[in-house]
Amino acid sequence: MIPPNHPRRESLLVRERLVEGFREGYVVPQGLIAHGRGECFDYLLGEATVEEAWEAERAAVAALLTAKRPVISVNGNVAALVPEGVVQLARATGAAVEVNLFYRTREREELIAEVLRRHGAEEVLGVGDDASCTIPELFSERRRVSCRGIYVADVVFVPLEDGDRTEALRKMGKFVIAVDLNPLSRTARAASITIVDNVVRAVPNMVKLAEELKALPREELEAIVKRFNNDENLRRVLRRISQRLVELAERGVAL
Ligand code: PTJ
């Protein structure tokens, strides 16, 4: 039980969701470690959506809205942290939802599909025999994808990703959107758009942005995507983190 006045309550509640997913069998232990790494970078950012992340989220939503076949890829951590957000975003952008796991087992695929359906998903791709197409040059279990989903998608949204698949999807000519709190990860550096934000903030932000941007004409949405420069955005995030650390060092952090 987390006390209501605990200063780190929000962060602890997020952890609890992952622990629950772990107990239910669809979050892997490695997912808990991955989250800890994310939390560390979130501290450096100030645990808030920074301006660069907002810009990336806006461009990402514009890319999803203008895509012919957008797909949102869901792993164990994403299913535990933002299941309702994924379903809402899919609805708002017309994207398909697909389960795609690094540590793939049939049981986890089905449990995750069930979590998504419980939150309103109508169809969940990538489960069992549906994942019968293969991403070339990828040797992890992530290579198995739905022939109706990621395999034929033009834009793939992959919150919490591993670098290998991002690179393989880019090689297939796909536009890849990633959420990663670590701006130095291979995923962050290989994606077409990297959102350096916590997935628990990024996905709800994107749902709001989708409602807003839906009204814009196609050319304007395309211009938003074109104007976005991922390398520049990542450099600005790194500059922001380093400036913040210098300011904190000068001001002092003792309680
Ligand atoms: O469910 P599976 O089998 O597909 O496995 C999922 C994990 C997350 C275990 C798997 O994809 C993995 O091992 O990922 P990595 O390579 O550890 O990368 C995860 C990245 O996500 C790291 O760079 C973390 O900094 C980042 N991250 C972790 N939690 C969050 C996050 N970024 C944003 N929001 C978070 N909450």
Image: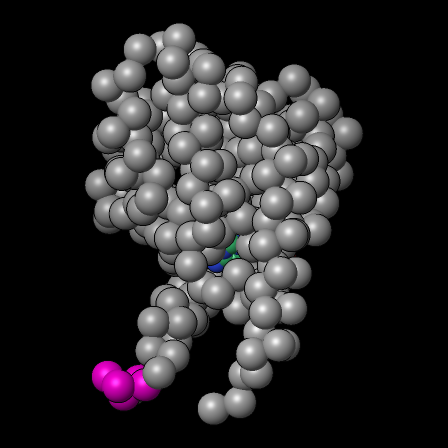
Left or right: residue 222 versus residue 246 is left
Magenta stretch prevailing secondary structure? loop
Give the image location of residue 196, x and y in percent: 54, 48
Residue at the (72%, 45%) spot, across then down: 186
Give left or right: position of 28 versus 7: right
Confirm whether residue 150 shows in the render: no
Q: Which residues lie in the magenta part?
A: 2-6
Q: Residue at x 29, y 16 (%)?
A: 216
**Eyeballing the image, is 194 above or below 221?**
below
| Rendering coords of residue 129 (x, y %) | 50, 31
Q: Is residue 182 left or right of residue 49?
A: right
Magenta span has 82? no
| Residue 24 coordinates in the image, percent (x, y) | 39, 66
Q: Residue furthest front?
A: 250
Q: Which of 47 and 15 lies nearest the eye of the viewer? A: 47
Comparing 227 with 168, the one in front is: 227
Residue 225 visible here: yes
Q: Residue furthest bottom?
A: 255
The residue drawn where x is 28% and y is 47% is 84
Q: Which colouring convention does the figure follow?
A: one colour
Q: Position of residue 137 (x, y in %)?
A: 77, 29
Quarter of image, ligand 1: bottom right
Picture mark count: 0
Q: In which quarter of the view is residue 215 placed?
A: top left
Q: Nearer the viewer, residue 10 or 166?
A: 10
Q: Residue at x 61, y 45 (%)?
A: 236
Residue 58 horizontal side relative to residue 178, left or right? left
In what quadrant of the picture does the N terminus appear?
bottom left
Q: Is residue 109 above or below residue 134?
A: below
